Amino acid sequence: MKIAVNTRLLIKDKLEGIGWFTYETMRRITKNHPEHQFYFLFDRKPDPHFIFSQNITPIVLNPQARHPFLWYIWFEISVHRFLKRNSIDLFVSSDGFIPLKSKIPSVNVIHDINFQHYPKGIPLLTRHYYKHFFPRYAKKATKIVTVSQYSKNDICKSFNVPPNKITVAYNGANLTYTPVAINEMQQCRNEITNGKPYFVFVGALNPRKNIPRLIDAFGLFLKTSSLDFYMVIVGKPMFLNKDIENALTRLEERSRVVFTGRLPVNKLREVLGSACALTYIPYFEGFGIPLVEAMRCHIPIIASNKTSIPEVVGDAAYLVDPFNITSVANAMHQVATNPELQRTLSAKSAKRKELFSWNKTAEILYQTMSKIIET
């Protein structure tokens, strides 16, 4: 079979959640199924690292699709034309976008539809594009894959999609993430927080990640506990967000919040594994890969009790109301001062990680593809 894959988010050193999903699943599927020919569709010259096996042909289609107008041109003209001219049997898209004009069967991965519930944090044109096209993408797709039962229910309800059209495939995490040794931990802390313990957040800094409230909660924690802690925030801003700057202005000890930007996997493993706890309190999340990365590092997790997050963490996290900074600050205090709680949460993290692997994700995605290929 000839299978075309939307790989435009495979960009060297810039992989976020969807990019990692694409990388980890397609790396396995292409290697495990040499009987198929895969066409990876990029919107710029790809890094050779992303051409995983000999049965992959990289294709660069113009224009570079990084703006709503260009998204439309890329999918509805460039991708559609390629699929038609090359007699493609199946189109797989891992970012929710598919060409509506195409008659080619498709598997569409829609990770979440946060824009449906919290549109305010998204630029106006992007917001309108999502709200107009994603219901159509969901109905047009032959099959949909999503990353949590929460997201499946949300897509079904919001877009009137039958449940039997959607398959859940949980995300995994890179096997590089492992527990950090004591000496390695201290070296990392010396490097980024003057040797002091810290909480860590990992993720793209967009509004739904709730960074301003996390900073406010950390400020309250410092005031009420008098503990010598830092907050480390790992990630790159996705959209301009003045609320983060305002929260930093409110913080009396601004120097205690450290922004690292995006980190390579090896370094992120050190920073994550050296933390007192992952503090991950988005008010909307389709899955949350950093949760599994933290589990693999065996560190305690403080997590939001909203949307998909309780489904992902189970009992392996201290759950908090992400809209209540007192709740978050209290959780920080409990985890920072209670060694028994730290040990319990760490042990539960280590056990919970076994539920998630990219091998499982890739197999479920391929099974969904196979149902169409074999038809």
Image: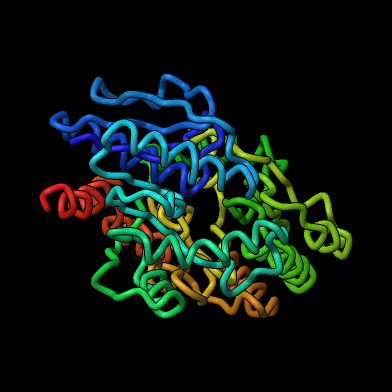
Q: Which residue is drawn at 53% across and 47% down?
A: 272
Please indicate, yes or no, whether residue 293 appears anywhere in the rendered image: no
Q: Which residue is at 27% across, 37% downward?
A: 88
Residue 284 vertical position relative to residue 60 in the rendered view, above or below = below
Q: Quadrant of the N terminus?
A: top left
Q: Name the residue located 72 percent from the left edge and 61 percent from the top edge.
A: 124
Q: Nearer the viewer, residue 149 or 126?
A: 126
Q: Where is residue 340 in the image (x, y as percent from the top left)?
A: 45, 68
Residue 105, image x, y percentages: 27, 51
Give the vertical position of 178 relative to 254 (above or below): above
Quarter of the view holding residue 40: top left
How many numbered discs sit on the rendered protein?
Answer: 0
Task: State the image coordinates of residue 242 (x, y, percent, origin top left).
Answer: 82, 58
Quadrant of residue 162 in the image?
Answer: bottom left
Instruction: Determine whether, in the image, residue 100 is placed left or right of residue 260.
Output: left
Question: Which color scheme does this rendered protein use?
Answer: rainbow
Nearest the viewer among 228 and 230 is: 230
Locate residue 199 relative to residue 60 in the image: left or right. right
Q: Position of residue 247 (x, y in %)?
A: 81, 63
Instruction: Report the front residue among 234 and 153.
Output: 153
Residue toward you, 281 or 237: 237
Question: From what the image shows, is residue 253 above or below residue 55?
Answer: below
Is residue 138 visible in the rendered structure shown here?
yes
